[in-house]
Amino acid sequence: MPVYAFSPDTFSRAREKLIRFSKTHGDRRITAKAIRWVQEMPEVDINQEGTLLLAYVHSKKLLGFLAVAKYGIRESFLVVHPKARTQQIGKTLTEEAIHRLGKLYARVAVDNMPSLKTCFAARMVAFSCIRGVTGKPTLWLAAGDWSKDDVERL
């Protein structure tokens, strides 16, 4: 499988490429806060419970990147290269994150149909609608061994 999980050492070497990939191919949907989190995150934080960084690489080319902090409650985002968006890469990365973490949360604006389709294809369920950081109606989604209480304790 071309899915690769980052260690503190490999993340340190790939950080700038991942940030550039996210800014270039995120269709301006990745928040500045999320990008800043990846920029400023100490490498050792990758070992924190609920934190995971995954890349989808094919023929030495980065085609997808998923980043999660605190199971997605603190931060989560997914970026797939535009030329690879019909290849189920987002679904693969999301399912791998659910498998590795045991549970996964995400916030997705209701007008972000590609991301919602990816989440639903990975069997995530919407459990709440909030006003997101951009002011748009946003769905809280979850999968795995999740509990609405995890989010309500924020």
Image (spheres, rainbow, N blue to C red):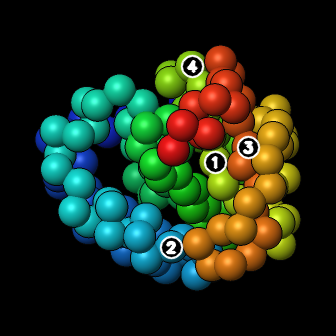
Residue wearing tag 2: 31
First reached walking from the N terminus: tag 1 or tag 3: 1
Crowd around label 1: few <14 · some 14–19 · many ≥20 (10 Å): many
* Contact flag, marks 2 and 3 (Cβ < 8 Å): no
Residue wearing tag 3: 141
Q: Looking at the image, can residue 119 be seen?
A: no
Q: CA distance from mark 2 to mark 4?
A: 25 Å
Q: Please, what secondary structure does the residue beneath circle 3 have?
A: strand
Residue wearing tag 4: 102
* Contact flag, marks 1 and 3 (Cβ < 8 Å): yes
Identify the image quadrant of residue 1.
top right
Percent across and percent down for residue 25 are: 55, 74
The residue under label 3 is which amino acid type? Leu
* Contact flag, marks 2 and 4 (Cβ < 8 Å): no
**Above or below for 72 versus 97:** below
The residue under label 4 is which amino acid type? Gly
Residue, x 83% and y 72% (percent of image)? 111
* Contact flag, marks 1 and 2 (Cβ < 8 Å): no
First reached walking from the N terminus: tag 2 or tag 4: 2
Q: CA distance from mark 2 to mark 3?
A: 18 Å
Identify the image quadrant of residue 137.
bottom right
Identify the image quadrant of residue 120.
top right
| Horizontal side of residue 100 vs 40, given as left or right | right
The residue under label 1 is which amino acid type? Ala
Mark identifier at residue 106 = 1
Q: Please, what secondary structure does the residue beneath circle 1 have?
A: strand
| Horizontal side of residue 97 vs 44, given as left or right | right
